[in-house]
Amino acid sequence: MFDQISLYEECLESSGSANMEYYEFYFRQDSLIFVKGRCSNHALRALDDLDKFYLSFSYKELSKYLSPFGKQLTEGSKNTVSPLLPEGKMFRGKINDKYPVSLIITKINEDGSLNMKYWYDQVKKPIEWRGTFKNNHFSLTEDDYHSEELKQWIPKATIEADWTGNQRITGTWTNYKTKEVMKIALNLY
């Protein structure tokens, strides 16, 4: 019994951090359920009567933490509210009307700086863009390689694009060396 108490005390300590890396989650009609995997390793599983931990939060409890778009999703509202920022969103579209691509924007920092990744759907190898997002406009650079001699990244392309209608990214991708310009059109996925 003391081994079991010790196991759960250690588990509680490790669960106290705000890190959600080891949690799974799923939605129910009226709540969001977080699932934390068991605390015991396979050798101590016989001591672990609880196995997984389930934390349930009603949408009403979560409401004060949600954006209008989040509330629309959880309340099933018929009113359409678009997300205000492209942060945390995935987009699909084409470069030059012929190269299918996907793009994900994970984080836009308070100063407007960001890194984002896109990939050609056929190749699926992530390519990073870095730059800024200010006043619904992206100014980005796609780097080609790092020059050890110059101690800097060598740009491959510059991207200038706008976030329009809270659903679309449109603009241009310009080859840094040849100055060839291709248009970009991406829609919220």
Image (cartoon, rainbow, N blue to C red):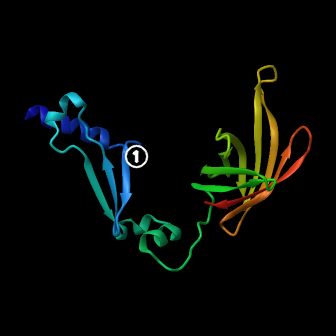
The x and y percentages for residue 147 are 78, 24
The x and y percentages for residue 117 are 65, 44
The x and y percentages for residue 11 are 25, 38
Q: Amino acid at mark 1?
A: Met
Q: Is residue 130 left or right of residue 44?
A: right
Could you say which is closer to the camera, residue 14 or residue 168?
Answer: 168
Q: Determine if residue 20 is in view.
A: yes
Read off the residue under disc 1. Answer: 20
Image quadrant of residue 76? bottom left
Q: Residues within 10 Å of mark 1 (few under 14, many from 20)?
A: few
Residue at image coords 69%, 63%: 168
Image quadrant of residue 65? bottom left
Residue at image coords 41%, 42%: 21
Q: Is residue 21 left or right of residue 163?
A: left
- Pick out the residue farthest to the top: 149
Image quarter of the N terminus: top left
Provide the secondary structure element on which disc 1 rests. Answer: loop
- Pick out the residue farthest to the bottom: 78
Image quarter of the C terminus: bottom right
The x and y percentages for residue 58 are 33, 66
